[in-house]
Image (cartoon, coloured by chain):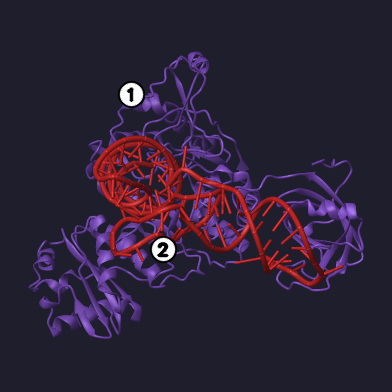
Chain colours: A purple, B red
Amino acid sequence: MKLDRLGDFSRTHRNGELRLSHAGQKVRLLGWCKRVRNLGSLVFLDLRDRWGLVQLVANETEVSPDLLEKLKAVRSEFVLGAEGLVSERESKNPNMPTGEIEVRLSDLKIFNTAQTPPIPVDDSPEANEDLRLKHRFLDLRRDSLQRNMILRSQAASLIRNYFQRNDFVEFETPILGKSTPEGARDYLVPSRVHPGEFYALPQSPQLYKQLLQVSGFERYIQICRCFRDEDLRADRQPEFTQVDVEMSFVRQEDVQAMIEGLMVELSALIGKTVVAPFPRLPYKDAMEWYGSDKPDLRCELKIQDVTSLFDKSEFGLFRAAADSQGKSRVRALFFPGEKAGAYSRKQLDELQEVAKQLGAGGLPYAKWGKEGFASSFKKFVDAEGEVAIKTRLGVSSEGLAIFAVGPDDQTSRVLGELRLRLAKALGLIDESKFAFLWVVDFPLLEWSEEDKRFVACHHPFTSPHPDDLELLETDPGKCRAVAYDIVLNGYEVGGGSIRIHDAETQSKMFRAIGIDEDEAKSKFGFLLSALAFGAPPHGGLALGLDRLVMLLCNCNNIREVIAFPKTAQARCLMTEAPSPVDPKQLRELKIQADRS
RNA sequence: GGGGUUGUAGCUCAGAUUGGUUAGAGUGCCGGCCUGUCACGCCGGAGGUCGCGGGUUCGAGCCCCGUCAGCCCCGCCA
């Protein structure tokens, strides 16, 4: 097919903006053909651009036979230029914004043809994700991804504007950095100039932003790509974007207030009203009530301790917990409602399967439904006992209670997960809500069975809680950190801390996690040295931009807000990265590939 | 590293009870007809390595073993 040249053809309007008020105007439009409807001597064509759709029409009594033939030759996704008169439609379409008008063609340019797309370019039904990723450039033409990418751009712009307004300085820190111990696996980049030596891509610009505080910039912001060579999830990509923030002379509350202001504005971007300050929940309470360090507060149900109800019970499993002096506890969740009370044997079995996979022995339950009281441990519960359970759990009518027994870390895991699943299945989550909260007072350190030492929960630059300083040397596992996560609808969308700003505390911290003086010097010498030259008290946080935008877009997968994401196996199906390289490149780098 | 799940026409899927003739549907695509369509309609047509390899069987889309790929989860992610 002979193509037209763009020449000096340019658009006078955007397709989606034409209205009845434009009637009578001669317009020039650009875009892609969404669909042709050929009625013989009357032909319609929907023309799509970034701003919307408009219907073009040609009628054999009005246009030349050549133009009509040309129009009939157009196929889906051809790239077109159209010239014509905006006219009121004979038959209007109330379902589209431009549905009152159409453009009566006087000229048509075909700038390019297109093969039949391997995936549908409209929104339903959605093609398999591997096909979508392979032809991502087509996938990105779809309305939903166009919307997501545009919202992402708006969010990034809002964020820059917000921090600019608040006197932050935007920085760019090195991508080629130094590999440090602790934390995630690094992506490494070989140095050609220094054979056998490697740069590491940043897991986060943590140390740079702290050093910029030492330099006196006081307020730092960077929207930066970070890299972690760990396995992927629906909300985790090997490269992701962080909104990195750091401030001098601040307390935890100052950082939180600054971020809350931003969240209010970001929420408003999609028409959600949220009220600051957000709830603050100590880590301990989050685990106790919600079984999670990132609870979804769109559902208000709380885990309850019911151990003491069973201190005289015949039910050995629960009785043992009551006798264990806190080593083991019986904890329960009650889901109110008819639907919960009517949970079937089969559904309960499925829940039990989930509980077992999470490490529980089984899933004791009690339910109150149309047939009255039923329970997996009913034979151990008399009428009085049932009343006691109902009173403790706050059961007023129908519903389902599930129980977990064992050490806290296990019962939290089980009940935390089942809380989410059941709340979702039972419609107990208010989907319209944007539920922010801060989880605070995280432990500073946790024991690593693998490494046989304490490791930092957050990172090794996190300040110990001032009240717990002594514990760092006497009982490190009990020491709290001045660290805080911001959680939205059950997703951790950011985390930060007040940092250690003096060399002595920093050395103490390194000691606590088993990094000796020599190692500390060789790995973090620059930091220790900087802290010794008048580092101000400082702290900050980093937001996961991808997750945040994912939630703004009402998606449950981070790939929907990343233009060119990778698969769960960390491949790009479009470019087929990663790939073997030319042996010559390896020789230059003095690297041998071992593909065994 | 482990567990679960999916893979059949360009795309989305069906293919049951028990392994049995020529593997179907919708949509898309190609051709014809059609002056008010907008998920256009009507008529006709083309289109299949049932992911790949091996095995069991007289016979495998279906059963078995292996393998590859997508997705979800655990571990991992300071």
Quadrant of the image occupied by residue A39: bottom right
> Which is more foreground, mark 1 or mark 2?
2
Q: Which mark is residue A38?
A: none
Residue A299 visible in this rendered orientation of the protein: yes
Q: To which residue does mark 1 refer? A: A518
Q: Residues within 10 Å of mark 1 (few under 14, many from 20)?
A: few
* SS of the residue under disc 2: loop
Q: Secondary structure at mark 1?
A: helix
Picture coordinates of residue A318 (x, y %)? 13, 67
Q: Chain of mark 1?
A: A
Q: Which residue is mark 2?
A: A296
What residue lies at 30% left-to-right and 75% top-to-bottom?
A343
Front-lying residue, A154 or A366: A366
| Among the two numbered marks 1 and 2 on one chain, the one whose residue lies closer to the N terminus | 2
Q: Amino acid at mark 1?
A: Asp
Q: CA distance from mark 1 to mark 2?
A: 43 Å
**Chain of the residue where label 2 is placed in the rendered structure:** A
- Is A299 placed above or below A112 here? below
Relative vertical location of residue A110 with respect to residue A531 in this rendering, above or below? below
Quadrant holding the N terminus of chain A: top right
Quarter of image, res A62 = bottom right
User: In this orientation, which residue lies closer to the viewer: A439 or A576?
Assistant: A576
Quadrant housing the C terminus of chain A: top left
Q: Position of residue A278 (x, y in %)?
A: 48, 63
- For disc 2, the neighbor class at 10 Å (few under 14, some 14 to 19, many from 20) is many
Q: Is residue A244 among what the camera can see? A: no
x, y percentage for residue A467?
32, 51
The residue at 10%/76% (across/down) is A380
Are the numbered discs 1 and 2 placed on the same chain, yes or no? Answer: yes
